[in-house]
Image (tube, rainbow, N blue to C red):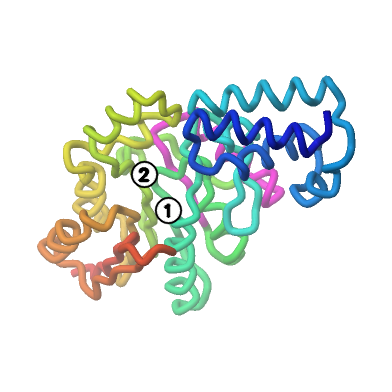
Amino acid sequence: MTVREMLHESTQRLQKAQVELPHLDALLLASQVMQCSKEQVYVSYPDEIDPALYIEVMQLIEQRCTGIPVSYLRRKKDFYNNEFYVDSRVLVPRPDTEIIVDAVKEFILQRGGTGQVLDLCTGSGCIAITLAELLPAVHITGADISSDAGEVFLRNAEAILGKPLPFVCTDLFSNIQGKYDCIVANPPYVTTFEVEEMINRGWPEPVLALDGGPDGTDFLCRIIKQAPQYLNHNGALFCEAAGPQMGKLKDIMEKEKYIDIELFSDLGGRERVIRGIWQDK
């Protein structure tokens, strides 16, 4: 069997399982097993595939057919030009989350490129570690309720930065001390109903990182109300959320006396990030 025939068979199996991007997923899994780039897989189309490699690819295809994300099967996900280790202990980084990185970077650079940043619900650490690479003069701390996520966070920090970053195991602010110039949060913001549907479909990502309550804003509301205690004067809170939640979150920020509230849209034009500035009285 040639590489082309194997890829065709893989794609057909994924199509039958109604996987959203069957050809791309088949290509990524083949490149993982063959230990080469996607482009090299294409170049290898006429070549005979080693039977052992064929079996390994098909085993991964069968797992993908059950709903396991490609990123979990490959144990990696690209984010902001870096490759992050991921497994079922953390949420898979999404491209739209790069929007919050850009927004925070711009804010910090406007303040001279220094300061203290706290990344709540850090998970894999994609936000904190990317910011640490982009803003080397900034002191960045990651925080998450999951000690398992902390292990993934530290693994990624060592791999990408060559050093660990501070990590606090905490339920939002419960174990946080001191004040910060910027607090970043990508908390669970999927509704409980949506999460239940995802579980019924066999979704493998941790519920702890997804379920944001009946309307998805439980954690977001807590963060907005508690963050001022941990923000320096003119410090900023950035939160990732879903577009339909932004009206409610903006109202809460206004009631909590944040100023200069701003919304940022994701790659699809949907409102994805809300920012408020806190002026200490």
Q: Quadrant of residue 269?
A: bottom left
**Nearer-N-terminus badge (2/1):** 1
Residue at image position (67%, 52%) is 161
The answer to whether the residues at label 2 and label 1 have Cβ atoms under 8 Å apart is yes
Quarter of the picture containing the C terminus is bottom left
Percent x, y of residue 245: 21, 54
Q: Is residue 154 magenta?
A: yes
Q: Residue at x 51, y 35 (%)?
A: 150
Residue in the image at 17% along x and 37% along y: 214
Image location (x, y in percent) of residue 117: 45, 58
Instruction: Tell me if residue 61 comes above or below residue 79 in the rendering.
Output: above
Query: Which segment did they paint magenta?
Result: 140-164
Q: Nearer the viewer, residue 83 or 253?
A: 83
Q: Residues within 10 Å of mark 2 (few under 14, many from 20)?
A: some
Three-letter residue code for mark 1: Leu
* The N terminus sits in image quarter: top right
Of tags 2 and 1, the one toward the viewer is 1
Residue, x 47% and y 33% (percent of image)?
Answer: 18
Residue that numbered label 1 is attached to: 118
